[in-house]
Image (cartoon, rainbow, N blue to C red):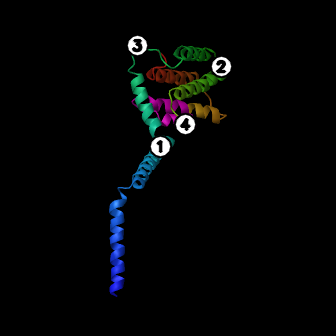
Amino acid sequence: MFRDSCIVTDIWYNLVDFLTTFYKRPEFKTAVSVFKVLFVLLTLIFVGLAVWFKAQAGFFSEKFLYYSYYFSTKKRPDEPSPLPLKELKEYWQQLGLRLNYQDEAQWKLAVIEADNFFDHVLTLLGYQGESMGERLQKVLPEHLPIINDVWRMHKTRNSLVHDASFRLSYSQARDVYETYEKALRQLKILG
């Protein structure tokens, strides 16, 4: 029995001696350095994955849209716009000429093209989504105060496209065109 307790005591002292001298050995310092590098790499990988998942969820795109639009409206007058404003304005004016015809088919084309044009502008401004409806949901009322009117015009276009019996009057077509024009002015697309 005494012999067993001596063996246990001897093992205990050897273990304590090993542990107190191990951290002074060069192998221990190398192992710690390797673990530090691995820990930093794993941390960077997990942070990268977290950012990637947030980006996939649309977190950053909504924040980017909010702040990029805010700062783009506060730009200096001599600073060039990244959007082809001149071309967009010219196209919009050509589109409005369709309303000069006394033909319901031309008015329908004007409504459809105005809706498509506004959807294209939303895409150029960075709003994401599978459809115009999804992009409109991401437009903040601070950026576009008449967002509800735009929704109403988009619904008019949808009725026009999906309902064969839908009759479009000149005043409805003019209302759609003018509402989109007002929205484009609020978004600083038309001067």
Q: Are marks 1 and 2 in contact (CB under 8 Å)?
A: no
Judge from the rendering whether residue 167 lies leftward or rightward of residue 50; answer left or right: right
Please name which of the two marks, 1 or 2, marks the residue nearer to the observer: 1
Residue 71 on the magenta span: no
How crowded is the residue under tag 4: few (<14 C-alpha within 10 Å), some, or many (20+)? Answer: some
Q: Residue at x 47, y 43 (%)?
A: 48
Which of marks 3 and 2 precedes in the sequence? Answer: 3
- Which secondary structure, mark 3? loop
Residue 23, image x, y percentages: 35, 57
Please name which of the two marks, 3 or 1, marks the residue nearer to the observer: 1
Q: Which residue is mark 3?
A: 77
| The one of 51 and 188 positioned closer to us in this rendering | 51
Q: Which residue is mark 1?
A: 48
Q: Considering only vertical position in the picture, is 182 above or below 130?
A: above
Which of marks 3 and 4 precedes in the sequence? Answer: 3
Residue 59, image x, y percentages: 45, 40
Q: Which residue is mark 4?
A: 129
Q: CA distance from mark 2 to mark 4?
A: 34 Å
- Read off the magenta span: 129-154
Q: Which residue is mark 2?
A: 103
Q: Type of residue at label 4?
A: Gly
Q: Type of residue at label 3?
A: Pro
How crowded is the residue under tag 3: few (<14 C-alpha within 10 Å), some, or many (20+)? Answer: few
Q: Type of residue at label 1?
A: Gly
Q: Residue at x 60, y 18 (%)?
A: 95
- Which secondary structure, mark 4? loop
Q: Type of residue at label 2?
A: Asp
